[in-house]
Image: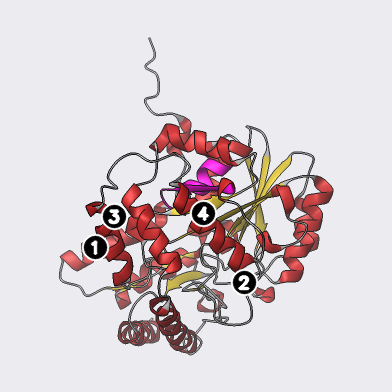
Amino acid sequence: MTRRTVFAERARIPTGVSILEVLARAKELEAGGREIIHLEIGEPDFDTPANITRAAVRALDEGYTHYGPSAGLPEVREAIAKHVTQTRGVDTAAEQVVVTTGAKAAIFFSILALVDPGDEVIYPNPGFPSYEATIKMVGAVPVPMPLVEERDFSIDLDRFASLITAKTKLCILNSPQNPTGGVLPRDVLEGIADLAERHDFYVLTDEIYSRIIYDGTFASYYALPNAGERTVLIDGFSKTYAMTGWRLGYGVMPRSFAPMVAKLFSNASSSTCTFVQRAGIEALTGPQDSVDNMIGEFRARRDLLVDGLNRLPGFVCRIPAGAFYVFPNITGTGMTSMALQEFLLEEAGVAVVAGPSFGEYGEGYIRLSYANSRTNIQTALDGMAAALDKR
């Protein structure tokens, strides 16, 4: 009798394994005495602002240590709705908000609630690896949407339109973007909204980096007048408030859709940690000077890193308008993205991520995070230059 396969097929779907492999190898080298500069990590290197931490402690003292409603504490949903109304200029009600354990959970359960097996989902490529992984997990068909370097990693609307079929159920947008740092301009968002209305598909707009923007004005897809009942906004606290370990995010969606997402989420996680939710109120309503200071420092690091990368042989790096990543074109080095990733780690002691870790259209690029000090970034640039000169 043939033994059945132990694991379900969905458990075998890659989810950014290459990034984990970079980190694991970097840790091995550090254990052996090497100094490694980490430019692969996608999280702010700042501490959570003290006023937010104090709010969590107060919530613990006040007894916020029990289950809460699956969609989130009412006062937290209300605070998020007010924040979205203020920042996007769209009247938003608490009933439209579902609070989750990080923005990634909001993405997962929104896709789970919307998409059936066989449906097609258009998603950015290169892009956050969890998009493609989640699409495959629910049995849908991932349709990669290339981000175009010549357009500052924006979207060619004609090419986007060519991807739409009768099976298109959802399109995922991310602006500012991981891994490119690109920001989608308003005219592109408006074009996608027109197509969504014409072809009757939903749009999930991941705006987790919306506060971390340096050049121009951020345009939110959710704020478009014709986004309407086909839009799910994803946001959270991890990036803006350096709260990655707190696991606090949210989705904003049509009133009829929110109970469905909350029901799915409740069966996986019951509810989001209640004292963490209370800290989220302080994050949104308290002083924002720590956020402003962090963004100012990120801008300085961005400028230092872009200038240094453009001095390296074979590198061409555009200036990203948001997030805290750069995505240089490295085809001039004559190396594949993976080969350069390994070379820089082994020879220069700099951990970066090969572009294909974010999708097939990432070949020819690497991602570097500037969530590290200016001193370390300069040391990394010097080490990369020395290693490339010796090659």
Q: In the drawing, does residue 233 fall left or right of residue 230?
A: left
Q: If you read the primary sequence from the N terminus, does the residue marked by circle 2 or circle 3 appear first?
A: 3
**Which sits in the foreground, 238 or 28?**
238
Give the distance between the C-alpha atoms of the residues marked 2 and 1, in whole angstroms.
Answer: 33 Å
Determine whether the residue tagged by mark 3 lies in a helix, strand or loop: helix
Q: How far across and down, in percent of the image, does residue 211 sit? A: 52, 72
Q: Quadrant of residue 90?
A: bottom right
The image quadrant of residue 372 is bottom left
Q: Earlier in the sequence, mark 2 or mark 4?
A: 4
Q: Residue 152: x percent and y percent?
A: 64, 75
CA gap between label 4 and label 1 equals 42 Å
Residue receiving disc 4: 78
The residues colored magenta run 96-110
**Mark 4 crowdedness (10 Å alpha carbons): few <14, some 14-19, many ≥20:** some
Residue at the spot of label 2: 183
Type of the residue with mark 4: Glu
Q: Nearer the viewer, residue 160 or 236?
A: 236
Residue 318 inside the magenta-drawn segment: no
The amino acid marked with disc number 1 is Lys
Sequence-first disc among 3 and 4: 3
Q: Disc 2 marks which amino acid?
A: Val
